Image (tube, coloured by chain):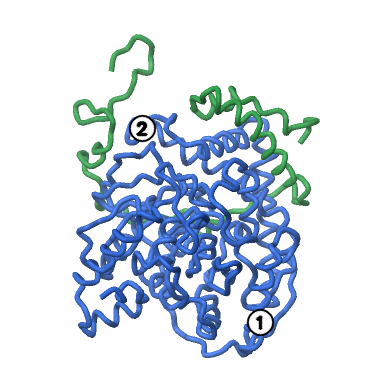
């Protein structure tokens, strides 16, 4: 890590925005204190001697698993929509992507 | 017939085939005991009064069609699973039904059960203590005889640690032994579904039922677990004892119990070999970087559009891990954290590969302490994370691990961890069973 003191560098507002989390003032306060402590602890991974090149570890043993190209069972449209907070015309209803657009 | 609920799964199957009682009597006995005991323990989030086959408890992050699945979170309050997880289909074919969905730390994040949005589960041995986590309700329900067996999930110890703290048998199979289809993902390179049972033999039986692949989890092996041999003693078995698992932080009384168990292994014919797992001290740091990162990615699917409520309904622990994982994956930090941890992970795997050249199984503690008081670590996430020190290395390496009861400290159970080579569940089950049969720990029941 090139930065001098990385454990103090977490920008709670910026990371919350990236994480799509709307944190309360209290949560920001708690995380502002706890997250640098936790990052301070996990920074010890830097002490592990590892090769700087090559593929990192993958736990998956199977690669490029293919199945026969035939239709199997899947959820019906009704089942897929059964837990949606809002639907319209048999589809998920979402907020508009562009401003001033109604759903 | 109150004794029905104290039977093991194997004994229950035998009693049913001998027509000693009916499946209806079996379920009624368990439902009656749940009504009597569970208000004290809070091990179930939902009780299925229509259960009419072999009654099992299912951790509430495994999908059972037309039943609630909350993952212990408010964000999924009211969610009804529209399909069955692969393990549920496999169990249904073995005449198993689901007596309840078990309480758990929210999204399997926790080591105490206190992170459930629906209140903590209590330890059946002492209701002022935590049962461990995150499969808190599953372990408590087995220990309190509220089901014939339970399913849990283990990402960094979430089957083995609550099994240890509740005095029951918990098996984390090898990564890829059991299909994860239908289990809410936490750390996709770590997660495994496994049994929590009253005996080692029951664990073997349930693994046989739930193992094997399907069309939906491409990392699951196609071959089901088929046990072939049972051991009578431990003659010729080489048991590795890593000195790193007996370092600072391990409670002295727990250490005494574990060392006694290792002496029992020797008496049973095993050869005890000192081994080194030199990267153990980095296990927690490596594990948490990888898990936080995978959590932030997996929980991004909760957008409140297709299912579930708004992301503000996540509890504090999921939010904490999403924040940390978003940070460790973010531009400028990805190489220093996620990539570095992935490389370091291969060092943990190499440690085990070297060790298994000298021994057949590795034994040590599951948890550095017995169950602690509810509330004791609740406001200190880092201390809570450190309690996973002996369970996360096996998760990082993808190897199987089992907790078997091996004694008590101050009236609370201690579990012995037995680790094996990748896909060698049969070896650790056999070794654990020989040990279990030489003791009476698994026959002890909490006074409820």
Residue B195 percent across, percent down from the top left: 43, 66
Classify B144 as above or below B314: below
Q: Are marks 2 and 1 in contact (CB under 8 Å)?
A: no
Q: Mark 2 points at which residue?
A: B309
Same chain for the residues under marks 2 and 1 in the image: yes
Q: Subunit of mark 2?
A: B
Q: Observer-nearest residue: B429 or B440?
A: B440
- Eye-nearest disc, 2 or 1: 2
Q: Quadrant of the C terminus of chain B?
A: bottom left
Farthest top residue? A100
Mark yes or no: residue B306 visible.
yes
Q: Which residue is drawn at 46% across and 65% down?
A: B177
The color chain A is rendered in? green
Q: In which quarter of the image is the N terminus of chain B?
A: bottom left
Element at label 2: loop
Q: How crowded is mark 2: few (under 14 residues within 10 Å), some or many (20 or more)?
A: many
Q: Which callout, 2 or 1, points at the residue further toward the start of the chain?
A: 1
| Mark number, residue B238 | 1
Q: Which residue is drawn at 38% across and 63% down?
A: B150
**In the image, which lettered chain appears blue?**
B
Classify B247 as above or below A93: below
Residue B351's image quarter?
A: bottom right
**Total marks in image:** 2
């Amino acid at each position: 890590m090139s930065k001098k003191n990385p454990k103090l560098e977490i920008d709670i507002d910026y990371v919350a925005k990236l994480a799509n989390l709307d944190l309360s003032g209290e949560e920001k306060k708690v995380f502002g204190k706890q997250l640098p402590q936790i990052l301070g602890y996990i920074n010890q991974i830097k002490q592990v001697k590892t090769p700087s090149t090559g593929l990192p570890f993958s736990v998956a043993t199977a690669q490029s698993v293919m199945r026969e190209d035939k239709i199997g069972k899947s959820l019906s449209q009704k089942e897929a929509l059964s837990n949606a907070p809002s639907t319209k015309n048999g589809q998920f209803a979402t907020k508009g992507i562009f401003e001033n657009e109604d759903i | 017939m109150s004794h029905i609920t104290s039977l093991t799964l194997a004994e229950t199957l035998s009693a049913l085939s001998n027509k000693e009682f009916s499946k209806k009597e079996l379920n009624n006995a368990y439902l009656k005991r749940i009504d009597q005991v569970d208000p004290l323990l809070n091990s179930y989030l939902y009780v299925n009064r229509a259960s009419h086959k072999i009654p099992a408890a299912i951790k509430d992050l495994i999908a059972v069609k037309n039943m609630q699945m909350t993952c212990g979170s408010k964000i999924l309050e009211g969610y009804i699973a529209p399909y069955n997880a692969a393990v549920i289909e496999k169990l249904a074919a073995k005449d198993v039904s689901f007596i309840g969905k078990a309480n758990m730390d929210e999204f399997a994040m926790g080591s105490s059960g206190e992170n459930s949005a629906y209140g903590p589960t209590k330890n059946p041995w002492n209701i002022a203590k935590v049962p461990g986590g995150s499969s808190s309700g599953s372990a408590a329900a087995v220990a309190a005889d509220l089901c014939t067996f339970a399913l849990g999930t283990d990402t960094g110890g979430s089957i083995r640690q609550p099994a240890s703290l509740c005095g029951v048998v918990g098996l984390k199979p090898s990564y890829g032994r059991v299909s994860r289809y239908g289990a809410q993902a936490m750390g996709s390179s770590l997660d495994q579904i496994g049994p929590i049972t009253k005996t080692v033999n029951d664990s073997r039986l349930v693994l046989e039922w739930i193992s094997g692949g399907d069309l939906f989890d491409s990392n699951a092996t196609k071959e089901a677990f088929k046990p072939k041999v049972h051991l009578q003693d431990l003659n010729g078995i080489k048991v590795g004892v890593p000195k790193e698992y007996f370092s600072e932080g391990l409670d002295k009384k727990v250490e005494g119990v574990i060392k006694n168990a290792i002496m029992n292994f020797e008496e049973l014919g095993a050869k005890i070999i000192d081994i080194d797992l030199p990267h153990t001290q980095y296990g927690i740091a490596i594990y948490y970087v990888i898990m936080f990162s995978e959590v932030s990615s997996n929980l991004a699917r909760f957008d409140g559009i297709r299912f579930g409520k708004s992301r503000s309904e996540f509890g504090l622990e999921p939010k904490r891990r999403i924040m940390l994982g978003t940070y460790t994956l973010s531009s400028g930090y990805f190489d220093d954290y996620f990539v570095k941890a992935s490389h370091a992970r291969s060092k943990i795997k190499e440690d085990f590969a070297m060790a298994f050249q000298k021994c057949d199984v590795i034994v040590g503690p599951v948890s550095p302490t017995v169950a602690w008081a509810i509330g004791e670590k609740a406001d200190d996430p880092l201390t809570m994370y450190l309690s996973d020190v002996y369970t996360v290395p096996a998760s990082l390496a993808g190897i199987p691990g089992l907790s078997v009861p091996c004694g008590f400290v101050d009236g609370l159970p201690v579990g012995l961890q037995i680790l094996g080579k990748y896909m060698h569940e049969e070896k650790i089950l056999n070794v654990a069973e020989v040990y279990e049969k030489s003791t009476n720990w698994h026959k002890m029941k909490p006074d409820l």
